[in-house]
Image: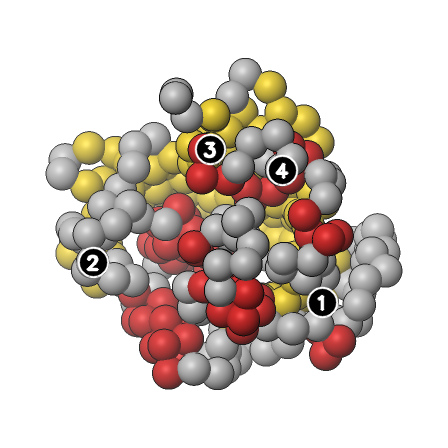
């Protein structure tokens, strides 16, 4: 683990410790102060944590959000929570993320008490284990400028370590395809008993590389740098406790694209194959004007 990667993971834990301004109002700082567009996963995870601050005895099982405006890293984000319903089994919260007096993101989140019930799930895809794969950032640095399809983002250290099943720059990676499985692991230790934190960190990870997956069937048609991409709406369902102390298989796949929008679905599987969570996102997938 590099010092930069370690710092990124620690920083993410820091910014999820939101500052309480008033009842139902929380302030979140950003991963960096360098002027950049806010990463959607950061806003998603902080909004989920703001909702968590207003509930007791329940855990997040689903969230649905819309990315309304691009946020900026130069200003903190205000999270306003609306307490929609407190039921015996389910609790509902609505969160609006605000910058410069304008909503940049809104979230509906549902929490549930622990209950027994039926238990079944699709099996995990048959893919190589993380020990058999290479770290994406190390591969990206080794490639240098040898792969024109490689995004500059591939060299950036993230709070999560990533190991792609299709090695970056390989012939298989360059092929037009509909799926992109990779293993991810948070770079800091998180107690599995702290499910509020684990589930919010999973929400952060659930927005990583989703939109770009929608462009994979068209890699041979349009270079990545000629695409404008952004998350539009996002849904996450958490089926079981999140074991964030281990590798998770993040299996992304695209089902359709049209009208400058792409649809992507993903599953998170634990190392033992258990299905942990499911994700669906529609993103802007537009070819830039010449």
Residue, far top:
259
Residue bearing the label numbered 1: 270
Residue 61 visible, this orientation: yes
Mark sitting on residue 219: 4
x and y percent of residue 18 in the render?
Answer: 27, 62
Alpha carbons under labels 1 and 2: distance apart = 34 Å
Q: Earlier in the sequence, mark 4 or mark 3?
A: 4
Residue bearing the label numbered 3: 227
**Pointers 4 and 1 in contact (C-beta within 8 Å):** no
Q: Mark 3 against mark 2, which lies toward the viewer? A: 3
Residue bearing the label numbered 2: 34
Alpha carbons under labels 4 and 1: distance apart = 30 Å
Alpha carbons under labels 4 and 3: distance apart = 11 Å
Q: Residue at x 75, y 52 (%)?
A: 172
Badge 4 element: loop
Label 4 packing within 10 angstroms: few (<14), some (14-19), many (20+)? some
Q: Quadrant of residue 240?
A: bottom right
């Amino acid at each position: 683990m590099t010092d930069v990667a370690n710092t990124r993971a620690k920083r993410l834990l820091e910014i999820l410790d939101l500052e309480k301004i008033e009842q139902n109002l929380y302030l979140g700082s950003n991963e960096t102060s360098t002027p950049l567009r806010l990463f959607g996963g950061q806003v998603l995870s902080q909004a989920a944590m703001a909702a968590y601050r207003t509930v007791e005895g329940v855990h997040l099982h689903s969230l649905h959000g819309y990315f309304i405006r691009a946020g900026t890293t130069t200003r903190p984000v205000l999270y306003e929570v609306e307490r929609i319903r407190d039921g015996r089994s389910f609790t509902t919260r609505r969160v609006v993320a605000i910058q410069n007096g304008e909503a940049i993101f809104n979230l509906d989140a549902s929490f549930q008490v622990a209950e027994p019930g039926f238990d079944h799930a699709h099996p995990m895809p048959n893919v190589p284990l993380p020990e058999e794969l290479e770290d994406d950032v190390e591969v990206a640095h080794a490639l240098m400028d040898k792969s024109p399809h490689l995004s500059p983002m591939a060299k950036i250290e993230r709070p999560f370590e990533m190991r792609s099943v299709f090695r970056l720059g390989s012939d298989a990676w360059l092929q037009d395809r509909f799926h992109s499985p990779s293993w991810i692991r948070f770079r800091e230790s998180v107690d599995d008993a702290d499910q509020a934190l684990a589930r919010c960190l999973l929400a952060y990870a659930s927005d990583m590389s989703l939109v770009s997956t929608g462009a994979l069937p068209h890699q041979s048609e349009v270079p990545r740098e000629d695409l404008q991409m952004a998350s539009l709406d996002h849904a996450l369902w958490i089926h079981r406790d999140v074991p964030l102390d281990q590798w998770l298989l993040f299996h992304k796949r695209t089902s359709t694209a049209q009208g400058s929008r792409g649809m992507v679905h993903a599953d998170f599987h634990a190392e033992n194959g258990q299905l942990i969570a499911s994700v669906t996102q529609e993103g802007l997938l537009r070819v830039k004007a010449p």
